[in-house]
Image (spheres, grey):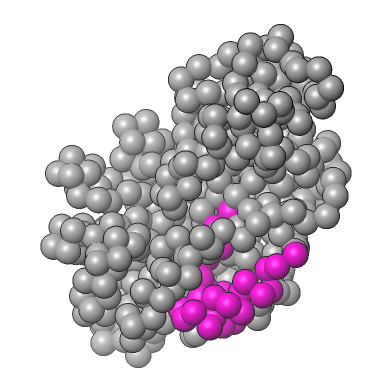
Amino acid sequence: MTAPNLVIRSRRVVFPDSVSAASLHITGGTITNIAAYETVPANCELVETDDDSLLLPGLVDTHVHVNEPGRTEWEGFATATRAAAAGGVTTLVDMPLNSIPPTTTVAGLQEKLAAAREQCHVDVGFWGGVVPGNTSELAALAAAGVVGFKCFLIHSGVDEFPNVTENDLREALPELTRLDALLIVHAEVPGPISRTGIPACHVDPESPSSTARTDKNVCPTEYATFLASRPRAAEDEAVALMVKLAREFGARVHIVHHSSADSLPMLREAKAAGLRITAETCPHYLTFAAEEIPDGATEFKCCPPIRERENREQLWSALKDRTLDMIVSDHSPCPPEMKLRDSGDFLQAWGGISSLQLRLPIVWTESKRRGYSIHDLARWLCSAPAKLVGLEQRKGLIKIGHDADLVIWNPSAEFKVEASALHHRHKLTPYQGLTLSGVVEKTFLRGRKIYDSGEFVGGPSGRLLTS
């Protein structure tokens, strides 16, 4: 066996089924041996954790809007991947929209890869997109290395990434099934939203499903108005459609940023029936509650919306029984002026929450209150997202043969969220001022330290995961 060039050891290494003392022997960026704590070869660099800290696998975040090229003023690969590293995220997957061009063609993917090169502090994968009329592009995108394909069932918010209808999906799904490619779905349909009569964004006002007359008396600064404009039925009908299509085509389907507790039974039954369907939720749906969101506080706006307290607790229960498989950030930043914080207009403000750097402490703070374990945390944030995008042989676990993507993390240390400590481009976030548990002390990407106690080490060393 080749001698390691690095050993990272801890008395609290988080393995899939245990937390125990071990020395991780690392050669060429890969974990080549897991030995007893005392086993450290001579002439080998040694990194040790203190007794209060855990050694976690690097986090994997499969739902990040980087927005470059085209809308780099919203975020960008340099800032997003620095925020990721500071949050213990060693692999992220970039969404195919909000960038210009979107990743709906191979040419669009090539432009994105060109923009990302030599900027990334962590490893980055890429989603392709399914939009009306691009079925002929899907095989080439898959061959070029995208991890799967995203579609919207409702207006995406940007015109260059149009939503699909059931007919569009019936055209695309035979090809996706032939490729055994994963389809991830923004699962809201416009009908129930249009019928509310509230003029919400992401809805085409000329849609034939818009049958209700707008109520001119709605108050756009009230969170209750925005919540009413995105009813649970929009998600529930979308989930029902995707369950039906997954069954009919034998397709691999994943529901993104799930928020409606009312459709959890459908997902549960679909999984029990053996359909290839998975689902994620996000930290904001597990932390906040509609009843507590102040009027005018548009930093809380996202689509689907943050729902009521009882809905939140049902989402937690669905994580426990594995109806929901993972927790991802859906980091969707924008310039602060697009949030319309001065007017507080929920109906016109951009919908998206910035949380890429904070996912680990947010989820730990909330989950430990409810009795969940470190192993639950590692599954939701590391191994399940890695498996979703086909990286389970390299990422998401501390295991021989895996990349030495590691995080030294103190679960007991607390900190207050301050804008000055956030590394994504724009700092407006609903987590501002909250006290969270769990401090990322050091982050390693393939054995190379990239973040250390608030400082970044070396230049960008992330790889683009397109093979």
Left/right placement of residue 166 relative to residue 317 reads left
Q: Give yes or no for residue 306 being in the magenta stretch.
A: no
x%, y% of residue 195? 29, 74
In the displayed orientation, state which residue is furthest to the front: 1
Name the residue nearer the viewer: 82 or 176: 176
Left/right placement of residue 349 relative to residue 413 reads left
Query: Which quarter of the figure has residue 304?
Result: bottom left
In the displayed orientation, state which residue is furthest to the bottom: 206
At a point 54% along the width and 35% down the height, the residue shown is: 401
At a point 51% along the width and 60% down the height, the residue shown is: 467
At a point 71% along the width and 28% down the height, the residue shown is: 4
- Asked whether residue 58 appears in the rendered view, the answer is no
Query: Which quarter of the figure has residue 271?
Result: top left
Q: Give yes or no for residue 101 being in the magenta stretch.
A: yes
At a point 71% along the width and 9% down the height, the residue shown is: 38
291 in relation to 102, above or below: above
Query: Which quarter of the figure has residue 234?
Result: bottom left
- Asked whether residue 264 appears in the rendered view, the answer is yes
Task: Identify the magenta region.
Answer: 92-118
